Amino acid sequence: MSNYKRLQISESKLNHILEYNKKLAEQLDRPSISVSEAAESMIRYCNSTKDPFLPSIWGKIDKEDDPFTPQSKGCCCNII
């Protein structure tokens, strides 16, 4: 293998490592919180925001108050 070819391969590897290092540095700069803090925040949100999908917290809701219940459109029977 020629010296020129080895130099190209080495430069390519170096560029790849530098790009990877740049991505890792960007990840390090990104703000983050601990999992326990995120879970606590989610629990606070679920306890303070009424959600019909959480009956264990908010209790069962009536069908007329449930926005996800299909609404009746009146009579669906036609006589010909």
Image (cartoon, rainbow, N blue to C red):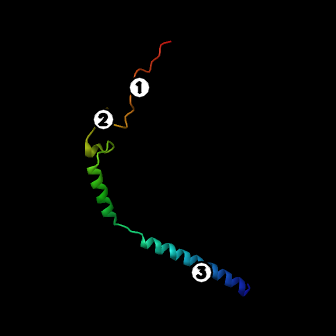
Q: Residue at x 25, y 41 (%)?
A: 59
Give me the C-alpha separation between circle 1 and circle 3: 67 Å
Q: CA distance from mark 2 to mark 1?
A: 16 Å
Q: What residue sits 74% from the left and 86% below the top? A: 2
Q: Position of residue 10 (x, y in %)?
A: 64, 82
Task: Look at the numbered disc 3 and give the secondary structure of its residue.
Answer: helix
Neighbor class of circle 3 (other Cα within 10 Å; few <14, some 14-19, many 20+) is few
Q: Is residue 11 above or below residue 59?
A: below
Q: Secondary structure at mark 2?
A: loop
**Disc 1 target residue:** 73
Q: Could you say which disc has been placed on residue 14 in the image?
A: 3
- The kind of residue tagged 2 is Asp
Mark 3 vs mark 2, CA separation in Å = 62 Å
Residue 45: percent from left, percent from top: 29, 53
Residue 65's disc number:
2
Location of the N terminus (image quadrant):
bottom right
Identify the mark nearer the N-term, 1 or 3. Answer: 3
Q: Residues within 10 Å of mark 1 (few under 14, many from 20)?
A: few
Position of residue 34 relative to residue 49, above or below, is below
